[in-house]
Amino acid sequence: MPADNIKRAIQKGTGELPGSTYEEGIYEAYGPGGVAMIVEVTTDNKNRTTSEIRHTFAKHGGTFGASVAWMFHKKGYVVVEKGKASEEKLLELITDAGADDMNDDGSNWEILSSPESFHSVVEGLKAAQIIPAAAEVTMVPQTYVKLTGKQADQMLRLMDELEDHEDVSHVYANFDIEEAELNALTQTK
């Protein structure tokens, strides 16, 4: 590739050249096994990105262009390790801060809130010296699709490829793979 092309591409990407604008986009699709997926992108070329994402879904057994957003709710999502606080203390604290629900996920507590209450829940935890392992406003699925075998493997490969794509900013999906199977699949890669 000529040096001028490389230089122009760098200048365009850093905003030094006029004409480069970035757009955000959302793609809805079904992955292997009927898994509902939402892919958020930021791109300077929507046609190229759409084509690449469509190809990625086709390659991994997915269906691009489905309407699946109704299967997700925007929620505040906070994860607290069980060793950081007792269930009673945590439940009282997050209820006062405006959280909607708390679930036991084995070694962690998962706390859900409305996007509007998210900040007060996180600040309430920090004020009580409880540092969350994760905290974000995200799209939470209403239901989950259990995957095993080939479909689970296809799904993991699809997720890897989407997350490696330079224009993809977030991928939300409603799949569930048993931890033992997930470990076995990731060991073989």
Image (cartoon, rainbow, N blue to C red):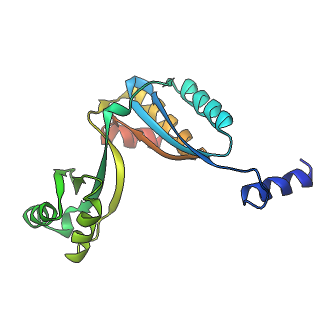
**Residue drawn at point x = 10 percent, y = 67 percent:** 89
Looking at the picture, how far across and down is residue 180, in whole percent? 32, 41
In the image, what residue occupies the spot 39% across and 24% down? 33
Residue lying at 55% horizontally and 44% vertically, measured from the top left: 41
Q: Quadrant of residue 145?
A: top left
182 or 114, which lies in front? 114
Q: Which of the 4 image quarters holds residue 135?
A: bottom left
In the image, is residue 113 above or below residue 160? Answer: below
Q: Nearer the viewer, residue 97 or 78?
A: 97
In the picture, measured across the screen, residue 43 lies left or right of residue 32, that is right
Q: Position of residue 84 (x, y in %)?
A: 20, 69
Relative image position of residue 80 (x, y in whole percent)? 25, 62
Relative to 92, 171 lies left or right: right
Nearest the camera: 177 or 186? 177
Task: Look at 72% across and 60% down and name the residue there.
Answer: 14
Count of numbered labels shown in the rendering: 0
Locate residue 3, reporting x and y percent.
Answer: 91, 55
Q: Is residue 179 left or right of residue 45?
A: left
Residue at far front of view: 18
- Residue in the foreground of this view, choosing between 170 and 46: 46
